[in-house]
Image (cartoon, rainbow, N blue to C red):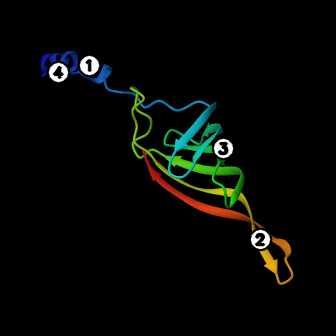
Amino acid sequence: MRGWLVVSALLFAPAIAVLPVCAQDAPAIGVSGAVGFPTFKGGVRVSTPLGPKANLDFEVARIGPMGEPELGPAFTGDARWMRRGRQASGKSRYWIFGVMFVDAKWSTPVIYPGRVATKLEGRRILAVPRIEYG
């Protein structure tokens, strides 16, 4: 019986040694970007780990040019969750849950009788929910 245990241990030890180890992300600073229609987004991102399966990401980005409405800087806060954790190869699927706040302003020209012209201007902070899978 003891011999069988030794043989089993010798056979399975190499297999256990090569199992992928889940790595945890380190705090990082980087750039981010997205291309879309009719605009694009580019910014700077700071990430910090919350544990082996989750990270927090904060981003300040420029969106544009788009015309109307004129968009100011975008501030994004996301929680990134990896169901199986970060794989040793670096390939990991994840969900992102968060919100993006964008400063938006627009103007509408108004012409009154007698050719009196003015502009009505508006400004709002838009909150855009973000749910993504990557």
Label ID, residue 109:
2
Looking at the image, is mark 1 or mark 4 earlier in the sequence?
4
Above or below residue 34? Residue 90 is above
For discs 2 and 1, the disc positioned in front in the rendered view: 2
Give the image quarter of residue 61.
top right
Q: Quick one: label 1, few (<14), some, or many (20+) residues within 10 Å?
A: few
Residue drawn where x is 68% and y is 45% of the image: 62
Per the image, the residue denoted by label 4 is 8
Q: Secondary structure at mark 1?
A: helix
Left or right of 36 on screen, residue 87: left
Q: Amino acid at mark 2?
A: Pro
Distance between mark 3 and mark 1 Cα atoms: 44 Å
Q: Secondary structure at mark 2?
A: strand
Q: Are marks 1 and 4 in contact (CB under 8 Å)?
A: no
- Coordinates of residue 31 in the picture (x, y in percent): 61, 33
Label ID, residue 13:
1
Looking at the image, is mark 2 or mark 1 earlier in the sequence?
1
Looking at the image, is mark 2 or mark 4 earlier in the sequence?
4
Q: Are marks 2 and 1 in contact (CB under 8 Å)?
A: no
For discs 2 and 4, the disc positioned in front in the rendered view: 2
